[in-house]
Amino acid sequence: MEPHVSLAAEKIFQIGPIPITNSILTTWIVTLILIFIARLATRRITAVPKGLQNIAEFAIETFQELVSSIAQEKTKVFLPIVATFFFFILLGNYLGLMPGIGSVGFFLPSEASVQEGHKIFVPLFRSINSDLNTTVALALVSLITTHYLAVKYLGIRGYLGKFFNINPIFLFVGLLEIIGEFTKVLSLSFRLFGNIFAGEVLLTTASTKLFAFIVPIPFYFLEILVGFVQALIFAMLTLVFMVILTEKSEH
Amino acid sequence: MEILKNFGIQPTLLLAQIVNFLIILFLLKKFFYKPITKALEDRKKKIEESLVNAQLIEEKLAKTEEQTNQILEQAKNDAQNLISGAKEEAQRIADQATAEARQTIDQTVVEAKSQIEAQKVQMQKELEQQILNLVVDVVKKVLGRTLKDKERHQLTQKAILEITKQVQ
């Protein structure tokens, strides 16, 4: 019986009409950890920071500098969104590397091969970004908040003026930009999904088809790097899209 | 839409993830970014204030130091003046005392001189008288008679002259 990572997240159980997949379960864990850490870091804010508050301040300050270098006066609005994307994706990616995620599960009889007595393995938890639902959801949130902020900063006229113009050349450009907005969702979601899913497959393959000891360690380091880089890329792209779309058009 | 099914895309799951993320966004914004950024800003403000205060204190210190120096300088000058004044006064007093002493000495000397002079004159006179008497006596004995007034006077004059020459 060959272990393999299925492309779609597996359903664990169902609440009413809502199917709960293993990636949804992991998302909840990520959410709880994230909120817990955030609460712990800001429970007692002191003038002289120590422990978790220090780390949180360092992270926020670094992000603040990064965001304000591009967004200037809009930093205060953009920072929470961009930073949340980063922290959520980063924690999701790293949690996916934890032992037990993707390896603890149960066996279900496969529908296709039930006659042959084959069973398929269903992991209880699944790295959140190796489910396209999660990454598409993130990309949609990124896109929608970007457009919402654009309307807020430019007004509805300025916002529509970015896409529609009487000048035929600019009208065509605007049309391309509308298409571009949709491809943004695809590129954002598939980039993240592809990287993390590939990582899962890589690790599974390395530890089952090659050798389960020592050999996967370099791949784990690689995945730690990828997890960080992908989170940063997603956050930075969101930031850049926001800055570009909330800027007043010259023409 | 076969591809979506292959990837396991389901609207309910999508919605669940979106809602989940929005909840995280809301909670983190409220409980994480706001307090942390506030703490950062507060600290920044405090540091800026402290720096301004430090500069003020430094300026004040410099001013105080300058004042102290000025006061010290003044005191030094005063002391110097006082000392030189006292020196001058002492010198003056000493000079005066010297002058007075000299004057007294001079006076004493002059007095002594005049006294000596007077004594000398008196002694001369007494001597003159005695010599005169002696001469008169000698002449009386030699001549056996009293000299006439005219002779006597001549003799006396001569003798006095002679004696005075010798005495002097």
Image (cartoon, rainbow, N blue to C red):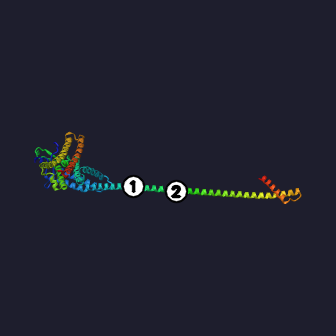
Vertical position of residue B103 compared to residue A217: above or below: below
**Amino acid under label 2?**
Asn
Vertical position of residue B85 compared to residue A222: above or below: below
Q: How many marks?
A: 2
- Describe residue A165's horizontal placement relative to residue B162 as left or right: left
Residue A6: percent from left, percent from top: 15, 45
As rendered, which of A71 and A101 lies closer to the eye?
A: A71
Q: Residue, x 37% and y 54% (percent of image)? A: B55
- Describe residue A1's horizontal placement relative to residue B145 as left or right: left
- Location of residue B163 (image quadrant): bottom right
**Residue annotated with mark 2:** B81
As rendered, which of A122 and B12 lies closer to the eye?
A: B12
**Residue annotated with mark 1:** B59
Q: Are marks 1 and 2 in contact (CB under 8 Å)?
A: no
Q: Quadrant of the N terminus of chain A?
A: top left
Secondary structure beneath label 1: helix
Tell me if residue A100 can be seen.
no
Residue A249: percent from left, percent from top: 18, 51
**Amino acid under label 1?**
Glu
- Location of residue B151 (image quadrant): bottom right
As rendered, which of A205 and B143 lies closer to the eye?
A: B143
Secondary structure beneath label 2: helix
